[in-house]
Amino acid sequence: MEFVYQCQNLDEVREQIDRIDRALVALLAERGLYVKQAAAFKQSSDEVEGGKRVDQVMRRVEKLAGELGADPQLTAEVYRTMITHFIASEMQEFAGRQARNMGNAAASA
């Protein structure tokens, strides 16, 4: 870490944690919007599950955790949970798109 504010009391520590929590939640929301966009480009459920991409992301964040001084086990657990959630969300989006496409095809037949 380049700079960590040296808190003078517990209230200051909590203010910093709250600031970080807000940033983390905002980043999760932003990541989710990009995941939703990615779902629109995927043509199969195999692409949605993206085993190679998941492995790539996990290797990258585990390396980042080491570089930035984060707990590697915690980082991996958080990312596994997040990726599992986003894949499930993408699968729902993909299934809905497939159903709409089939409905449109049936309607035009």
Image (cartoon, rainbow, N blue to C red):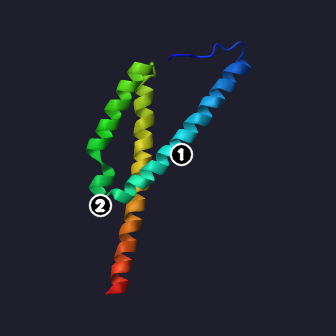
Looking at the image, residue 25 lies above or below residue 61: below
For badge 1, the amino acid type reads: Ala
The mark nearer the N terminus, 2 or 1, is 1
Please provide percent x and percent y for residue 72.
40, 24
Left or right of 53 on screen, residue 81:
right
Q: Are marks 2 and 1 in contact (CB under 8 Å)?
A: no
Looking at the rendered structure, which numbered label has been put on residue 29? 1
Please provide percent x and percent y for residue 40.
38, 59
The quadrant in which residue 61 appears is top left
**Please, what secondary structure does the residue beneath circle 1 have?**
helix
Q: What residue is rendered at 34% in x and 76% in y?
A: 102
Q: What residue is rendered at 43% in x and 50% in y?
A: 35
**Please, what secondary structure does the residue beneath circle 2 have?**
loop
The quadrant in which residue 53 appears is top left
The quadrant in which residue 68 appears is top left
Looking at the rendered structure, which numbered label has been put on residue 42? none
Q: What residue is rendered at 48% in x and 48% in y?
A: 32
In the picture of the structure, the residue carrying the numbered disc 2 is 43
User: Which quadrant does the C terminus fall into?
Assistant: bottom left
For badge 2, the amino acid type reads: Gln
Please provide percent x and percent y for residue 56.
30, 37
Task: In the displayed orientation, state which residue is furthest to the front.
Answer: 2
Looking at the image, residue 16 lies above or below residue 54: above
Q: What residue is rendered at 58% in x and 35% in y?
A: 23
